Image (spheres, rainbow, N blue to C red):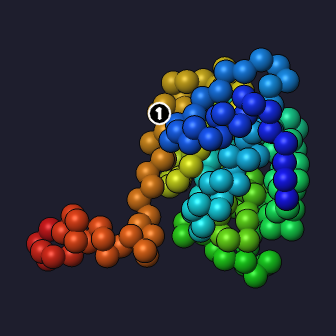
Amino acid sequence: HKIYMHRGQLEVYNFGARNTKIRGARGFGKTSYIGVHMMKCVLGMPRQMGGFVGASAKQLYTRTMPNALKVVEQLGFGKFFFLGQPPAKLHWDMPLARPRVWENCVSFSNGFVWQMLSMAVNVLGSANGLNLAALIGDETKYLPWKRVKEEVLPTLRGDFIPASARKTEVKKWGFGTNSKI
C-alpha cells in the first residue's frame, strides 16, 4: 500500500536517525508520521515491546492513537493489530516480555506490543518494570520531563538478544565462556 508523506515527513523518514525529535507547526503531520514510525519499529523488532508516552491516557486514546492507527490501516496492516487483547486469543506470536494487563496495549500479529504509558499526575510508575525496545512520545511539551527521565527512559533497555545475534554476541563479549562470571 502507498501512503502520501509530504517533503518534511519524507526527509525525517529517510534520515533514519536513532533518536528523532520533530518540532513542527500545527498541521505538519507529526501524529500521522508516528503511524509510519510505529510500523517501522513493529516490522523491525518482532516480539518486542514499545512504549507510547502521553500526558494522559485520554490524550493517547482520543488524539494520538486514532490518527496513528489510521495510518497503520492505510499502510495495509489493519488486520494485523488489535487493541486491548492478548495475542494468545488471536493465535498470534507472543512478545518476549508479556504484560500482565492487556487493556492499555496494542498488539500486532508478529508479537510486537505497544504499551500506553500515561504521565498524568495521578498515575505514578506506569513504566515501572518494563523492558522497552522502542519509545514514542507525542505532545512532549506537556510531558513532565523529570518523571520521563526517572521513570520512562530507564526502561529502554533493549536487553533481549535476538537469536540471529546471539552467537555473534557470545564470541564478541565472551558470554558463557567462564562459569565464574
Residue 137 x/y as whole percent = 65, 35
Q: Secondary structure at mark 1?
A: helix
Snapshot quadrant of residue 81: bottom right
Looking at the rendered image, the quarter that the N terminus falls into is: bottom right
Snapshot quadrant of residue 114: bottom right
Q: Is residue 125 visible?
A: no
Give the residue displayed 75% in from the left and 53% down from the top: 104
Residue 26 x/y as whole percent = 82, 19
Residue 76 x/y as whole percent = 85, 61
Residue 96 x/y as whole percent = 54, 70
78 relative to 138 in the view: left or right: right
**Residue annotated with mark 1:** 150
Snapshot quadrant of residue 8: top right
Give the residue displayed 54% in from the left and 29% down from the top: 147
Q: Is residue 95 visible?
A: yes
Other residues around mark 1 within 10 Å, as few (<14) / some (14–19) / many (≥20): few
